[in-house]
Image (cartoon, helix red, strand yellow):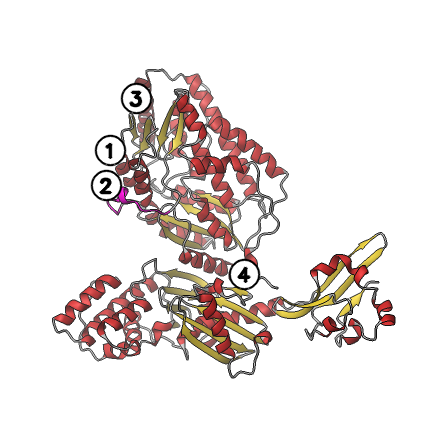
């Protein structure tokens, strides 16, 4: 079975393709201004080189702040739950998560199954988040990827009184003019962000099994500062930025397992003249679509139900079944192929 | 095609409640409702009140229409409010002041408040200074339930009545007070009936709809409110509406009057079935019970001090006890605490309350918001994660 997790964050869009227990593909790109278009491009990119087509994905779950803007997703889940699920896949021992994203920061407690048990989130202000670091990197003219290592080269940071983006920028420029090294400025800012993150973590319970997720966890300088404060070495997964998308894909896997139908769908009605029902056993239906072509009256269509492609009777045909379909016995006399004959799974039955 | 939104978001077939329209119309036009305008045209008086510790019955018995002063039902610029009230006052008091300063409440013939919290007190000071309402009164409200506290508050209530009588040059008789108490008690028992519908596994009315009813309750004469609420209850008895959700939720906090905020929780699949707010249970909670031979004023004072308490009261235990009782009665799975930004009493009580609820396995989601807010994207994320957390626990 194939599952997709799509994480449309405020700064970056991430996607993970999961085939049973293996990550077969993953993508990270800028979210940009048009989330819907981004999510579509993201899916295309995700499938490149996998030999898998969009139609073959069994279930898709979206997450992140743009989670409702993914038109092809079956469902959405909050990024808080997604990160807990994602990290649990790598490290089941994790109980405390710090998720540091583009515009917000969350402290999460979870259980051994990756279910959230408590969480707090920063407020409206995006000070000290990914966007803040991007801005500082610009001011100091250092590539974003390098600010962490540059900060580590400092021997003593300059204390910063604020993580407000506006004030910090002014303060940083002031220090630059006084000739303070960029490493010391960065060390000071990282210290301020680490303090804020630590305070957020203290509002949940800081249990051992500590992980950092989200884009900022790629910043080695910040990770070092946070582990000093927390006094625990954080567990970092292969790509912590993908953790939310992976979590969403795992949700897709769970949901699809729960939603696997054992249902026999009945379409039709009964009236004074008899009962006219076509039933389709969705557990048996393989989604091959042969019945759609076989039926001379064209009453079938393929549709996505509970994460699977299965046959169903067209909406407009359901109230006119005996008019459109003579019943399978009569149909066999009139036509060389019938829906029942082509269905290798014997999933279709007629009541008349 | 399949629905790409969460399946949880879709509510089953649902017929809009016809009788709710009256209440919605009042809320849309407040403070300039037809009834308020009509009373003014007839030479009647309309007073504003500010806190659930103001005994409204006395105003009613004096032939006045009491309306509750609320702020804007949206998050808006509070330029004037911010100019007069320092930012550490709650956004409710600044929102009310803004409306007062922009002459939205210019029609009021009097204002009555309680010395319940600093936000309310400072708002009142400014109201007295800058908004030319002819009559002002602030009741001193004790923080304890002791005998001394009760006699102090009774004296305050008596003083308020005398002040009002002198101002209007009338006498309020015990018979008039008894009549008003009876009318208000009827409102309370009708609202209890409405809340009984919310105890059902699939209530016929949503939390945001109930908020419309409550808002109108502060803004209409009780006579016509009771009449329309009876009609609503009749409609509910025959209604096929049955709300379902991912979890049963209770709202806890101070003044919340915006139904859209509750809607934003319900759109995530939360079923809001109970509340503990200044604008809900804390307003209509207890009946006024007049003992035989007792002066009605004494019964009024007793009820208003002993009522479902504000977080300002001490000890906090009484409020917690009632919240736990409500949570159990309405079978809630989780509590959403809304704290109007910089509301001190409620934010200080929250850690204790969270602990008490955790002990009985009810999780609490704390949301800080500006008064009038209808719920931003980040609030939606929190609510969704909270619902997912509760679902995983089940």
Residue found at x 57% / y 32%: B231
Q: Nearer the viewer, residue B97 or B350?
A: B97
Q: How crowded is mark 1: few (under 14 residues within 10 Å), some or many (20 or more)?
A: few
Would you say the residues marked 2 and 4 are in contact, meaning their CB atoms lie under 8 Å apart? Answer: no
Residue at mark 2: B84
Q: Name the residue under label 1.
A: B130
B369, A277: nearer the viewer: A277
Instruction: Label 2: state its secondary structure.
Output: helix
Q: Where residue B5 is drawn, which disc sits there?
A: 4
Give residue A93's position: percent from left, percent from top. Answer: 44, 73
Q: Distance between the residues labelled 1 and 4?
A: 50 Å
Indicate which disc, 2 or 1, sits on the residue closer to the N terminus. Answer: 2
* Residues marked 2 and 4, same chain: yes
What range is drawn magenta here? Answer: B75-88
Same chain, marks 2 and 1? yes
The quarter of the rendered structure image containing the N terminus of chain B is bottom right
């Amino acid at each position: 079975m194939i599952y997709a997790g799509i994480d449309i964050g405020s700064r970056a869009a991430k996607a993970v393709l999961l085939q049973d227990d293996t990550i077969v593909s993953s993508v990270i790109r800028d979210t940009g201004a048009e989330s819907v278009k981004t999510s579509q491009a993201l899916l295309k990119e995700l499938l490149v080189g996998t030999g898998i087509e969009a139609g073959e994905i069994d279930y898709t779950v979206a997450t992140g702040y743009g989670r409702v803007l993914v038109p092809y997703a079956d469902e959405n889940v909050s990024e808080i739950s997604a990160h807990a699920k994602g990290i649990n896949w790598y490290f089941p021992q994790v109980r405390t998560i710090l998720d540091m994203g583009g515009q917000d920061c969350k402290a999460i407690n979870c259980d051994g199954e990756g279910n959230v048990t408590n969480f707090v989130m920063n407020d409206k202000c995006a000070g000290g988040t990914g966007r803040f670091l991007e801005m500082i990197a610009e001011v100091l003219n250092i590539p974003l990827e390098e600010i962490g290592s540059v900060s580590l080269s400092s021997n003593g940071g300059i204390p910063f009184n604020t993580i407000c983006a506006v004030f910090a920028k002014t303060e940083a420029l002031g220090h630059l003019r006084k000739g303070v090294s960029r490493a010391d400025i960065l060390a000071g800012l990282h210290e301020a962000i680490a303090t804020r993150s630590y305070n957020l973590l203290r509002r949940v319970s800081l249990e051992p099994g500590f992980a950092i997720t989200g884009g900022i966890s790629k910043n080695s300088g910040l990770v070092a500062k946070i582990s000093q404060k927390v006094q625990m070495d954080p567990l970092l997964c292969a790509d912590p930025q993908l953790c939310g998308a992976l979590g969403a894909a795992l949700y897709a896997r769970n949901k699809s397992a729960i939603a696997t139908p054992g249902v026999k769908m009945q379409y039709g009605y009964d009236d004074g003249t008899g009962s006219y029902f076509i039933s389709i056993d969705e557990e048996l239906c393989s989604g091959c679509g042969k019945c759609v072509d076989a039926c001379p009256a064209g009453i079938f269509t393929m549709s996505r139900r509970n994460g699977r492609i299965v046959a169903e009777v067209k909406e407009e045909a359901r109230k006119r079944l005996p008019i459109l379909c003579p019943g399978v016995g009569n149909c066999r006399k009139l036509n060389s192929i019938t829906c029942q004959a082509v269905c290798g799974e014997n999933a279709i039955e007629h009541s008349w | 095609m399949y629905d790409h939104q969460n399946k949880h978001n879709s509510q089953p077939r649902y017929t809009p409640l016809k009788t709710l329209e009256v209440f919605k119309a009042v809320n849309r036009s407040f403070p300039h409702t037809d009834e308020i305008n009509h009373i003014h045209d007839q030479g009647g008086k309309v007073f504003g009140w500010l806190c659930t510790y103001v005994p409204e019955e006395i105003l009613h018995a004096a032939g006045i229409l009491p309306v509750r002063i609320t702020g804007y039902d949206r998050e808006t610029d509070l330029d004037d409010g911010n100019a007069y009230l320092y930012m550490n006052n709650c956004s409710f008091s600044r929102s009310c002041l803004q409306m007062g300063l922009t002459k939205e409440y210019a029609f009021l013939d009097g204002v009555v408040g309680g010395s319940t919290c600093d936000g309310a007190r400072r708002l009142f000071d400014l109201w007295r200074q800058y908004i030319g309402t002819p009559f002002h009164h602030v009741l001193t409200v004790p923080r304890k339930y002791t005998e001394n506290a009760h006699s102090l508050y009774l004296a305050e209530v008596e003083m308020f009545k005398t002040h009002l009588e002198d101002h209007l040059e009338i006498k309020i008789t015990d018979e008039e007070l008894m009549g008003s108490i009876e009318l208000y008690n009827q409102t309370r028992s009708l609202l209890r009936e409405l809340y009984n519908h919310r105890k059902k596994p699939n209530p016929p009315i949503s939390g945001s709809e109930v908020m419309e009813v409550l808002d109108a309750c502060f803004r209409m004469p009780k006579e016509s409110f009771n009449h329309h609420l009876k009609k609503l209850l009749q409609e509910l008895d025959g209604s096929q509406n049955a709300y379902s959700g991912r979890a049963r939720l209770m709202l806890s906090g101070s003044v919340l009057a915006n139904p859209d905020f509750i809607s934003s929780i319900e759109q995530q699949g939360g079923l809001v079935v109970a509340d503990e707010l200044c604008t809900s249970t804390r307003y209509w909670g207890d009946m006024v019970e007049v003992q035989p031979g007792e002066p009605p004023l004494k019964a009024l004072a007793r009820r208003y001090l002993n009522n479902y308490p504000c977080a300002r009261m001490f000890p906090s235990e009484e409020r917690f006890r009632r919240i736990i009782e409500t949570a159990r009665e309405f079978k809630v799975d989780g509590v959403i605490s809304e704290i109007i930004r910089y509301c001190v009493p409620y934010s200080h009580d929250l850690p204790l309350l969270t602990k008490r609820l955790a002990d009985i396995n009810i999780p609490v989601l704390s949301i800080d918001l500006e008064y009038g807010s209808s719920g931003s994207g980040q609030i939606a994320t929190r609510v969704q994660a909270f619902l997912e957390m509760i679902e995983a626990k089940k």
